[in-house]
Amino acid sequence: MPGRYSYLILGSGRQGIAAAYDVLRHGEASRLVLADRSLEKAKEGVTRIRSLLGQRPGVQLLHKRVDISRSSQLRDLFKGHSALLSALPYYHNPKIASLAIESEVSYCDLGGYFEMTKKVLALDSKAKKYGVTLVPDCGVSPGMCNSLAASAMEKLDRTEDVTIYCGGLPQNPKPPLGYQVVFNLEGVLGNYFGSSYVLRNGRIKQIPSFSEKEILSFEKPLGKLEAFVTGGATSTCPWTYRGKIKNYQYKTLRYPGHYEKIKLLKDLGLMENDPIQFEGQKIEPRKFFTAVAEPRLTFRDRRDILVMKVIARGKKDGVPCEIVYDVLDRYDPKTRFSAMQRTTGFSAAIVLEMLAMGKIHAKGVVPLETAVPGRTFLEEIRKRGIAVKEKVIKLR
């Protein structure tokens, strides 16, 4: 049956399409608009969704072209919607968030680069003035990983430490990096070589990304994986949990050998942002590298794995214990959604739908871990076929 809510999704890339699919299945939608700077790409996205879900009687499914540089066009597009999702590259989010406030439309985004998220957080007073709710960083990491951490913490009487590991990996790794592009490569590298906010002994600290490498063992087919600090994924959690727990940290997972190869590129200067002179032109090494490498890291074989481990240690009924969540999601041949699409797009859609339905009552810019109870997120993500295994381990 047709629903009551109107949704706008900006960006018809992989994550945007997965979120749109979820909204039509779970969001009680009366209207869904998929907008992109390429009208053809938006149209293809709508066609793809219709091929998966068929006709939805009484539900408008529309595609539109949007020019992100034209604020007046964006305001006109935003009006009348219950909520919108920015599935655009992270650097557009502050502008989209500000215009969403002015259009009095609730907002969430995929996040990923915390320096941009801080600009969204700075809009808190403006959002409260307009009576609007914004929830940034709602993808997979940041996003799903922090919601699962919140769920684990809710099960403990007292939490001391949270450690999160997550990685999007190809099922069949190929040279040269054993990695395939599953979203914006520039964003990935930004988190590799920025800094990470963590809680250490109760204090918020910035530690260098691409540091503190360790090796973890997983069940087959994964085996041993590398883990190292990257930025962005802890999002607002160090501030939210300061004074409540001692430690909160995140590491990215990759196949063995990836770390050393990226470090070599870094040591050669190819990851630098500062422009250099080359044949009379100024170029940024990282942008140049991204332009050259991204096509070579985008493979036709889209079968991937999303692996996540969330560990919360503390006390339950006076006994030291830890809650462990394990996720191993795979490319879905039925929908042809990658594991990264499923976990990122579906996670963001959960928040988008809650915003549209008025289930998040706080106004202003609200951290995800505050906006959505962990147990609610866990229940919702499992409804979507994402298996989250839970273990409760008593510690001696």
Image (spheres, helix red, strand yellow):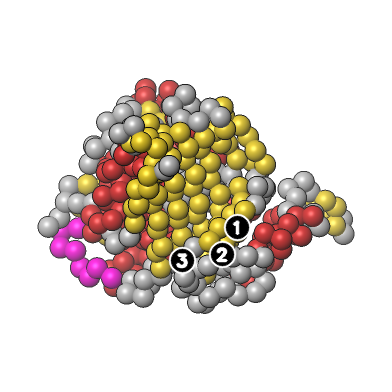
Between 355 and 338, the one lying in front of the other is 338
Inspect the image, locate mark 3, and give the three-letter code of the amino acid beneath it: Glu
Residue 290 in the image: state x and y as whole percent.
Answer: 67, 60
Residue 173 in view in this figure? yes
Instruction: Give left or right: position of 144 versus 227.
Output: left
**Please, what secondary structure does the residue beneath circle 3 have?**
loop
Q: Is residue 203 above or below residue 349?
A: above
Q: Is residue 220 above or below residue 210?
A: below
Q: For mark 3, what is the residue?
A: 219
Residue located farthest toward the right when viewing the structure as drawn: 279
Inspect the image, locate mark 1, and give the three-letter code of the amino acid beneath it: Ile
Q: For mark 2, what is the residue?
A: 224
Mark 1 near mark 2, Cβ–Cβ under 8 Å?
A: yes
Q: What residue is at 33 percent from the left and 71 percent from the top?
A: 335
Residue 99 in view in this figure? no
Q: For mark 1, what is the residue?
A: 215
Question: For the stretch drawn in magenta, what is the main secondary structure?
Answer: loop
In magenta, the rendered stretch is 52-60
Q: CA distance from mark 1 to mark 2?
A: 7 Å
Between 394 and 56, the one lying in front of the other is 394
Q: Quarter of the image for the N terminus: give it.
A: bottom left
Residue located farthest toward the front when viewing the structure as drawn: 396
Q: Earlier in the sequence, mark 2 or mark 3?
A: 3
Residue 154 in the image: state x and y as whole percent.
Answer: 32, 37
Inspect the image, locate mark 2, and give the three-letter code of the amino acid beneath it: Lys
